[in-house]
Image (cartoon, rainbow, N blue to C red):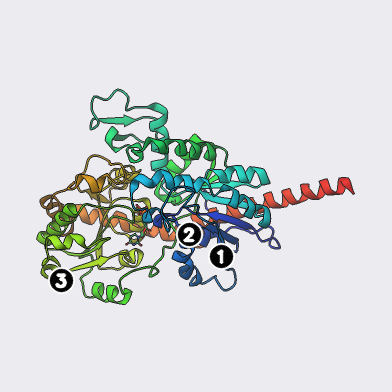
Amino acid sequence: RFILAPSSTKIHDHEQLHVFFVPFMSPGHQIDMARIFASRGVKATILTTPLNISRFESSINRDDYHHHNPIKLLLLNFPSTAANLPPNCENLDAIPSRDLSYNFSKAIMMLQPQADDLVRQCQPDAIISDMNFPWTAEIARKYGIPRLVFRGTCCFSLSLSVAAAQHKPNVNVSSDTETFLVPGLPRPVYITQSQMPDQFFGNTDLQEFFEKFIKAERNSYGVVANTFFEIEPDYVKHYEKVTGKVVYPVGPPRGNEGDRGSVDEDYCVSWLDSRESNSVLYVCFGSLCEFAESQLLEIALGLESSNICFIWVIKSDAFLLLDKDFEERVKDRGLIIKGWAPQVLILNHPAVGGFMTHCGWNSVLESVSSGAPMITWPLFAEQFYNGNFVLTHWKIGVGVGVESGLAWGEEEKIGVLVRRDRVEKVVYQFMINGGEEVEGMRKRARKLSELAKIAVSKGGSSYVNVGLLIDDLLNQKVERLSKKKESVDQFV
Ligand code: UDP
């Protein structure tokens, strides 16, 4: 199946496939899958809540296929009151406290009846839903259509989670930081207990939801993965083997270049245009990390004393009160973006020579796609696994030196995780003094970037996978319709 065909063939041109997409309400997990399929002629309908619609409506409207095959948006009313959430908390990045994650998950579970109603009315041919909506598997079964689960991370991390849960190599370790081998994977992988993602859950109440996710994946028709075959062929095949599901790697998405920045994008580009190639470090920790002010100050001072050029994205500038002259002191070589950066646009600029990242999978994939090597600073969830893959498998990055994962939200409470001198040393070594070692990383990253581009272009592996899935779902539709016709005929 992974042998590349010249292009996928549409076997039933007269039929348009209608797919419901249910994306998770978090900035890193939005609408890319619907866009990928809509750009291939699928009638794509996204189910989401009003505030999430307003976040991405304009970017959908700008898509080039939009005028002939628009993505449709259907509303799910978010049950804030019933789930004891304050109003306007329809996205994970909007909840005022991490202690409310349970309520957020509960609210998501409550959306089932509304979605059921919409499926009944619109009769889509399939559902592709984020794993956080396990009830989509029940709805799909009820209406006799396939449900595919969307996994927003790489098959390496997924396989590692499965192997760790199955073999429990961590039970006999003497400390959280003792390194052990995780057996049963295509290659030897070493981790520590403190890097395992269940650290993220912190709140054990959430465990009940994760069990539902796993069960729903088992009951799904297949897995749509935000990765591409060439970066992890062994792990795509391995994940298929251990889950017994067909895995369709369809990434990387083309990204939201220029879509959503809270900075003037032209300014950003002209700032980058004035820099030498590979001279700028892009520093961003995704949409959910909330560093304490003390940590932000350490990063600021580390970046300053390293003397490098940088773009640094911060969600809040309150820490600048701790050092009022910082911006003025670095203004000739540092661009600080407060709010939301046009990340894909920045990473793809030739002046950007590296990315300091928390290793959220979207960020890693965007870094790979743009050919930028990374300074990895994983925090929570499966970020240590992603970081492990970056450092030990692809060898396209260096670690900042953090050894243990956190529960989401702990980063704010703990305060300083990495001191300024460490930031300075790693950043300087990577951007200025890296020599052949970093040049090698850059070369490997560029190679991956070429592979990523090929994967999504016509005839590439991800392009073909999208076509294969469309064909498969169309076949199922035809079969379903003819069975329905047969049973009607019997009664006539
Ligand atoms: N992102 C962005 N601008 C920002 C911060 C994040 O465009 O200022 C995007 C980034 O390009 C990526 C996503 O938000 O697509 C973050 O996803 P990721 O999986 O890396 O991390 P998460 O936010 O889920 O922790």
Is residue 275 shown above or below 317? Answer: below
Q: Residue 446's x, y, as percent? A: 32, 59
Disc 3 residue: CB within 8 Å of ligand 1 = no
Label 3: element kind = loop
75 shown above or below 58:
above
- x, y percent for residue 25: 45, 54
Label 2 lies in ligand 1 vicinity (Cβ under 8 Å) = no
Residue 407 seen from this side: yes
| Marking on residue 71 | 1
Which residue is disc 3 drawn over? 331
Outermost residue to the right: 492
Is residue 429 visible in the rendered image? The answer is no
Amino acid type at circle 2 is: Ile
- Give the CA separation, mark 3 to mark 1: 42 Å
| Res 281 → quadrant | bottom left
Question: Where 170 falls versus 86 (above or below)?
Answer: above
The residue tagged 2 is 31
Mark 1 falls on what kind of element?
loop
Q: Are marks 2 and 1 in contact (CB under 8 Å)?
A: yes
Spot occupied by residue 245 in the image (x, y as percentages of width and height): 54, 40
Q: Nearer the viewer, residue 409 or 301?
A: 409
Q: Nearer the viewer, residue 130 or 428?
A: 130
**Residue located 36% across and 39% down the image:** 201
Assign ligand 1 to one image quadrant: bottom left
